[in-house]
Image (tube, rainbow, N blue to C red):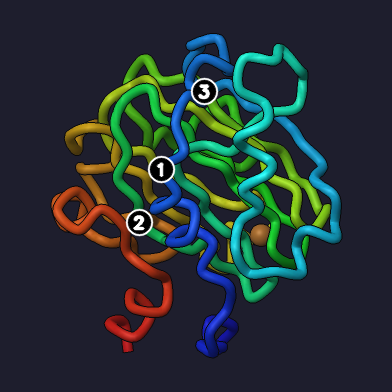
Amino acid sequence: MRLTRRDALARVAATTAVGGITGVAGCTGGTGGTTEETTEATTATTTAAATPTATAAETGTGTSTPTRGEYTVGMYTDLYFDPVGLHVEPGETVSFELVSGAHSATAYHPDNENAFERRIPEGAPAWDTGVFGEVGAFRNVTFETEGTHDYYCIPHKMVGMVGRIVVGSPGGPAEESENPDFPLPDSTRITEEGSIAFDDWQSEQQ
Ligand SMILES: [Cu+2]
């Protein structure tokens, strides 16, 4: 099927996670599930490393250009999110970056298109980046509600483009059943390991 390409692609998550990026929460107003848009210069995407200049300059300036979150999840034309499993703490922000193709990162919440069921904790907002296709662009989601957040790509849900973010400790309806669209890593493992690369997860499924 489609999830076969395993050659190395840019590991944006790793490069940004170790960058020590801080101070992002204040830019999002503290409202849970807030999404932001940005259109970074496409020239910046030719390098595998995240663009540090996009983060440091904005602090305290009050500009409307969002900074990157503490973590980045890449969205790939081969129809996966990477890392597929990620642990964050409440109040932290994940930047969903368009690496290739056109995708969304959309919470399993009945208010979202084609979600069909809730797989995020009670009280969590129906977060959704919307579908976007500008390579190098990212959209931020700040997670305030503790528990397990399963999400999907609207156009590719039916072919198993899904991911999981554990905020604080695992919990909520996602813990009560297997993801209906594609197997996801166990939340306890995500919490322990912090991040699970898609390549590693895929190889374990074979
Ligand atoms: Cu997609």
The amino acid at mark 3 is Gly
Q: Up-down: is 123 above or below 7?
A: above
Nearer the observer: mark 2 or 1; the answer is: 1
The amino acid at mark 2 is Gly
Which callout, 2 or 1, points at the residue further toward the start of the chain?
1
Q: Which mark is residue 85?
A: 2
Residue 206 in which image quadrant: bottom left
Residue 61 horizontal/vertical position (percent): 70, 15
**Residue at point 40% right, 29% down?**
92
Residue 100 horizontal/vertical position (percent): 73, 67
- Local packing at callout 3 (Cα closer than 10 Å; few below 14, some 14-19, many 20+) is many
**Residue at point 31% right, 58% down?**
195
**In which quadrant of this rendering is ligand 1 seen?**
bottom right
Q: Which mark is residue 129?
A: none
Which residue is labeled 3 in the image? 33
Asked if residue 173 lies left or right of residue 66, the reply is: left
- Local packing at callout 2 (Cα closer than 10 Å; few below 14, some 14-19, many 20+) is many
